[in-house]
Image (cartoon, rainbow, N blue to C red):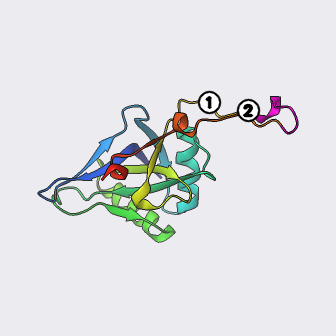
C-alpha cells in the first residue's frame, strides 16, 4: 500500500513544450491509499467519492509526470495495468503526484467542461407530477479554456 496525493486540475503545455499541471483552486487535493492490485475502476470510484462527485456521471482522467523528465508529456492511466505501474512507480518515487481531470461523461476531449461542484443539484423529490423545474445549465457548467480556442 502507498499513500498518494491526488490533485484536481488541468494539464497545460507551454510554447516550449513544457508541461505543467494547473491545480483547480476550488477542488484542490486529496490523499488516497492505493495498492498494486487497485483497478482503474476502483481508483475512479475512490477519487470521485473523495471529491464528492458521482462516478457514473463524471469522467475522471488520471495522469502523472515522471520526475526529472522535463519536456515529456504527462502519462495517462487508461487501464488496470497502467494503474498498477503507477503504484509501483510511486513506491519508488515518494514525491509522485496523481493528477485528475474531471469532465462530463459523453463530452468530447476537445469540448471538456468544468463542473461547479459547489452548486446543489436539482432535488426532484419535491416536484409535482408533470412539473419540471427549469434549470439553467450555465449555472452548473462553465466551459474550459480549451473550448474557446
Circle 2 residue: 123
Residues packed near mark 2 inside 10 Å, few (<14), some (14 to 19) or many (20 plus): few
Task: From the top left corner, tell me how far across and down residue 116 is, in percent.
Answer: 50, 35
Identified at 63% across, 53% down, the residue is 56
**How far is mark 2 from mark 1, CA to CA?**
8 Å
Write down the region rendered in magenta. 124-130
Is 71 drawn above or below residue 31 in the view shown?
A: below
User: Left or right of 105: which side holds 132?
Assistant: right
Q: Are marks 2 and 1 in contact (CB under 8 Å)?
A: yes
Task: From the top left corner, tell me how far across and down residue 123 is, in percent.
Answer: 73, 32
- Taking the image as drawn, is residue 21 in sight? yes
As rendered, which of 106 and 25 lies closer to the eye? 106
Secondary structure type for disc 1? loop
Task: From the top left corner, tell me how far across and down residue 69 is, in percent.
Answer: 18, 60
Q: Quadrant of residue 91?
A: bottom left
- Taking the image as drawn, is residue 96 in sight? no
Is 148 drawn above or below residue 75 in the view shown?
A: above
Residues packed near mark 1 inside 10 Å, few (<14), some (14 to 19) or many (20 plus): few
Q: Please check the rendered image and state whether residue 91 is part of the magenta-colored stretch, yes or no.
A: no
User: Left or right of 44: which side holds 71?
Assistant: left
As rendered, which of 149 and 55 lies closer to the eye? 149
User: Left or right of 16: which side holds 49?
Assistant: right
Secondary structure type for disc 2? loop
Residue at the farthest right position: 129
Identified at 29% across, 43% down, the residue is 22
Identified at 81% across, 31% down, the residue is 127
Q: Please check the rendered image and state whether residue 125 is part of the magenta-colored stretch, yes or no.
A: yes
As rendered, which of 93 and 60 lies closer to the eye? 60
Circle 1 residue: 120
Task: From the top left corner, tell me how far across and down residue 136 is, in percent.
Answer: 59, 35
As rendered, which of 18 and 81 lies closer to the eye? 18
Amino acid at each position: 500500500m502507498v499513500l498518494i496525493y491526488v490533485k484536481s486540475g488541468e494539464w497545460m503545455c507551454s510554447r516550449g513544450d513544457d508541461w505543467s499541471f494547473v491545480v483547480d483552486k476550488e477542488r484542490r487535493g486529496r490523499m488516497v491509499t492505493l495498492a498494486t492490485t487497485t483497478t482503474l475502476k476502483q481508483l475512479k470510484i475512490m477519487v470521485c467519492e473523495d471529491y464528492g462527485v458521482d462516478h457514473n456521471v463524471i469522467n475522471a482522467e488520471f495522469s502523472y509526470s515522471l520526475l526529472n523528465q522535463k519536456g515529456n508529456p504527462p502519462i495517462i492511466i487508461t487501464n488496470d495495468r497502467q494503474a498498477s505501474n503507477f503504484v509501483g512507480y510511486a513506491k519508488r518515487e515518494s514525491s509522485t503526484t496523481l493528477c485528475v481531470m474531471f469532465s462530463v461523461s459523453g463530452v468530447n476531449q476537445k469540448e471538456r467542461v468544468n463542473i461547479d461542484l459547489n452548486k446543489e443539484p436539482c432535488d426532484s423529490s419535491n416536484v409535482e407530477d408533470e412539473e419540471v423545474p427549469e434549470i439553467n445549465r450555465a449555472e452548473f457548467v462553465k466551459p474550459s479554456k480549451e473550448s474557446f480556442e
